[in-house]
Image (cartoon, helix red, strand yellow):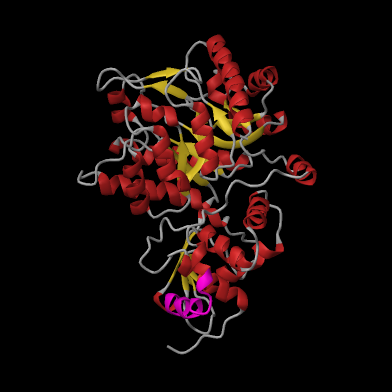
Amino acid sequence: MADVLLSEDQKLLLMAAAVGQLGPDRDLSIVGTNRILWLALRFSGLSKEEASAVFTRSHQKVSDPTFDKLFNTLRLMTRFKYGGVDHIPKTSGIVLFEGHGNWGDPDDKNVIPAHPDFTSCRLTSAGLANAEKLIENHPEYRDYAHEVVRPSPPKPTITDWIQMHLSNSIDPLAIGVCSWALNVKSVKELRQLCNQLKVNVIQIACGDPFHAAWDEGDKMPEAALAAGFQMSCTMLGFPGEDYTTPQTIHATGGFGPKHLRQERLDRFAWALDRTKKLGLTDMMFHAGFVPEKTDADYQPFLATLRKAADLAQERGIICALETGQESSDQLLAFAADLQRPNVRINFDPANLLLYDKDEPLPALKKIGHLVQSVHVKDAIRPTKPGDWGTEMPLGEGTVGMKAFVKTLKEIGYTGPLCIERCVSDQAQAIRDVEHGIRVLQEVLEDVM
C-alpha cells in the first residue's frame, strides 16, 4: 500500500484507534469515539489528569482547543452519513475511518455534531494497515491500551464552579429527585416541594397518566423553565401501561403491544418535541420487554425501536432505556443489534431486584459504558417467582447505596443521582425522598 501523507494529529488518531483495538471487525454500533480521542490526547503528552480535565470541559460545553482540533480532524477523516448522504473524507483519497451517529455536517458550522460519547467510530482495513505501520515507531503507546476512558474528573476549581453555575450545569453526582416521586400535579407544587427538600436537580415527567399529567397542559415547558429547576432529562410513560403485576406490564409496557406500536411512536415523537421545548437533550422511557432472539417478534420489535431512535436522532436527542426487565447480557446483545448510538441506558438498580433479574452492581459494571442517567432506588427481591419484589426506602433494601455510588464513580459516571420513589401516598413519598436525600448525603461524604 502506498504511504498516505498525514498530519501529526491524524497519525495520533490512527494509532489511538489501533491501540484501542477499534479495527474494522469491531461492532460499529457500540464503539465509542471518545476512546480514540482519549488515547490520542494521552499520546500527545497529556497526563491522565490533564486529559480528564479536557473531557470534563467538553461535557460542560466549554470549548477546549486541543479537544476541538482532534475531534474536527477525526470528523474530516471519517466516512459517515449525514441527511441520508454519504460524507466521504478527503484524506488522500483513502477512507481511514468509518462512523455512525450524528457527526454533523463538516461543510456547515451551524450543524453541530453530537458529543463523541454518543457517536461510534472504527478503522477501515486501510486505516488499520496505516495505523499498524505508524505504531511500529511508537511501541510505547501500546502500554495505554488498558486505560479507561475519562477517569473520575478532578475536583473543579473555583472558576469551574462559577462557570458551571452560570451555565446552569449540574454538578457531578448532584442529588436530585424524579418529579413523579413526589406525586405532584403541577409545576408550582413541584417547585414548592423542591424548595422544602432543598433540592433543585430533577428528572421531569413529560406528562402521562403514570408519571404526571401536569395541570399546566401544553404550557408545562414554559412553566418548568420559569421555575428555575436544573433539569437533567425527561421521562415518558405510555397510556395503558399496567404495573399491577410483572405479567400485566409485560403485556402492556412500552412498544411490546404490537397493535399499539404506531400509536406509541406518535406519542414518543410528541415527548421528544416536549423534551426539546424544555431545552433538554435526554429522554428516558420503558421500551417494553425485549423478546428473545428466537421469538418471531424480535425483529419487528427491533425495527420499532430503530424507528424511535431515529425520531430522537432527528431532534438531536439521546433516549435512555430503563433497566429492569432484561439481564445485562440481553441488553448488551440488543444494543449491538439495534445499531443506534443515541440509545443509551437509564440504570435503575432496584428494578433489577423488583423484576428478579441481575445483581445490580455486577450489571452496572458490565453495561456501565452505556449508562446515560440513573434512578437511585432501593428494593428487595420477590419471595415467590412471578411476583413483584418490594420497593424500599433508600438504604433499607439490598442494593447497597454506598457500593452503588462507588461503582458509579469507578465507571466514570458524572451525572446526577436522582431519587425515585413509587408510593401512592404523597406524604409518605415526601418523607421517603427526604430520608433518601440524607442517605445520599452521608454516602457522598464517604466516597468523595
Q: Which residue occupies the extreme bottom position in the image?
A: 2
**In the image, is 72 to the left or to the right of 253?**
right
Horizontal relation, residue 396 to residue 302: left or right: right
What percent of the width, then of the height, locates residue 142?
49, 67
> Compared with residue 308, is residue 400 higher up or lower down, i.e. above or below?
above
Q: How many marks?
A: 0
Residue occupying the point 56% across, 20% down: 436
Residue 289 % position (x, y) = 32, 36
Q: Which residues are magenta?
A: 127-140
Position of 339 relative to 159 (above/below):
below
Taking the magenta stretch, the answer to whether it contains residue 110 is: no
Q: Is residue 210 visible?
A: no
Q: What secondary structure predominates along the stretch shown in magenta?
A: helix
Counting from the top left corner in percent of width and height, residue 353 is at 37, 26
Q: Nearer the viewer, residue 86 or 416?
A: 416
Image quadrant holding the N terminus, namely bottom left
Above/below status of 362 relative to 72: above
Q: Is residue 439 visible?
A: yes
